[in-house]
Amino acid sequence: MDGQVTAGTLVGAIPGDTLKSWLTQRLAEFGWNLVTIASECLKPGMGPVDTLAFEHRVEASVREMARSYTEQCFNSREPPHVDAMPKQIEHLGDTCRRLHQKTPHANVLTRFGNITLRRAMYRQGSRGRTVSPLESLLGIACGATPGAQDLVGRLLGAVGASQGRCIDAIAERTGARIGPGKLRSLSSHLAEIMEPQRESCQLERLEKWIDKAAESRENVTLAVSRDGVSLGIAPFGNFEMASVATLSVYADGDRIGTVYLACAPEENQETLSRNLTSLLKAVIRSRGAKLSRTVYVSDAGTTETAYWKNVLRCFHVDGRRIRIERIVDYYHVSLRLTTIADALRLTPSQRTEWLTQVRRLLLEPGGWGRVMRSISGMVREHGISPGSEEDFGTANRYLHRYRRFMNYAEYRRHGSPIGSGIVESACKQIVTERLKLSGMRWSHAGAQQIMTLRSILLSQTWETTFRKSLIARPAVSVLTPAQAA
């Protein structure tokens, strides 16, 4: 099935004469209402308060016209009497029988407000679930049309959103106020239908960016990053580590675009690793020939390093080894240099001068060796402060352990990023600015729903992902007498 209800006996074209007659009457009423509003508000001696009232009343009138027109069109899709509709249909492999009369579905949310939908219902067996072919055709789910679902999803994924703010924003936009239960149902539904389409749409976006970069640039780089961020989990407010990843396309050092992935707290971050690996393989399989290089930019945390060792260090796509170059985040390395500077017996001015010098040296050809020689010289000349030996040793071992991933001059020469600022920004945008507002605590499922919506929104793939989700909806078909027998 392609997600469309195509059986002509289930739904039909809207009767043109009926709609024309309805429109003629309503447009006349609408016109007179606008004239009345203008005469009452834009009168002699009017002021700014009257202008405000005029705009609000016109907005409400236009919205009501759109709402009633939507209701009329939707209710006109089925025959007026259930006897004109098939006795049996098939939906999701089950046979359903027609009920005796139409029933109203009140408070169906649209972009213009709530409507009441009168539709025929079909039931599986004598006490099974009921199905509305009209609602399936229209894409209505959780008491909301596709247009309303689109609006609600974008609001749920917006920066600074909360349950109360979303409900207020929906009321402001549509004129209808929904409850928290309906909002949560829509959040769950949208995440459920959009997640299966997420990867293919993100792949399309990455392919377009790579094609665009390859047209005019010499060095096209695909940069992979991942990181973690703490998130408060209900009911006790314990903080667990959520995970975020990015895939960015760079051309001669300029970032063209980024897609985002995010997962709720989970042991070993297995879901994020699986999703990231799958998307990375798909990109390389599709556009690997156009990439100059693929790099993995991250700090040297336990999970980030494990992903490198277990997956990326020996990465294969369709039996072919893919070279991925690891880059340890320059700014995390700079923090270790700061620790070393704090451990040395230096005056404040000496500390600042030396720290500035070695941070610059690290970016030059042969930078790591020059920095290490400078550290040795400073230790011989000034010594280490009492009590700082352990901190100094830990930072020094870090510099030695990851030295082969610190060739920053070479990375910069071919246009690769040297910092994980993109994924750290993603942690802020996806988690901190949306899921860590004052007092927020999340279930794992609830957090995942919002993170899915937010990552799709930030990846600039919302429209295509939502459209594919609607197309993938299961269809309803009519059973012929032979099939019913």
Image (spheres, rainbow, N blue to C red):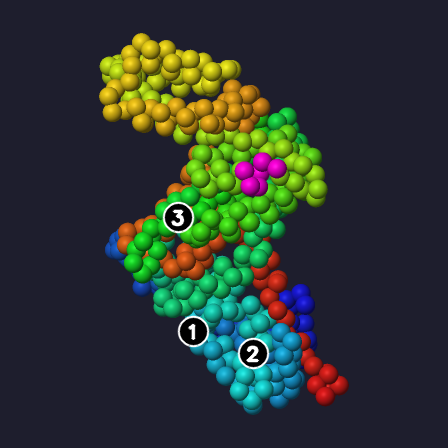
Q: Quadrant of residue 217?
A: top right
Is residue 311 a member of the stretch shown in magenta? yes
Which label number is shown at residue 131? Answer: 2
Q: Residues within 10 Å of mark 1 (few under 14, many from 20)?
A: some
Q: Which residue is mark 1?
A: 107
Q: Residues within 10 Å of mark 3 (few under 14, many from 20)?
A: some
Of helix, strand and loop, which one carries label 2?
Answer: strand
Q: Residues at badges 1 and 3 in contact (C-beta under 8 Å)?
A: no
Residue furthest right in the image: 482
Q: Residues within 10 Å of mark 2 (few under 14, many from 20)?
A: many
Q: CA distance from mark 3 to mark 2?
A: 41 Å
Q: Quadrant of residue 64?
A: bottom left
Q: Amino acid at mark 3?
A: Met
Which label number is shown at residue 69? Answer: none
Q: Which residues are magenta?
A: 309-314
Q: Earlier in the sequence, mark 3 or mark 2?
A: 2
In this rendering, is residue 364 above or below 27? above
Q: Main secondary structure of the magenta part?
A: helix
Q: Nearer the viewer, mark 3 or mark 2?
A: 3
Q: Which residue is mark 3?
A: 241
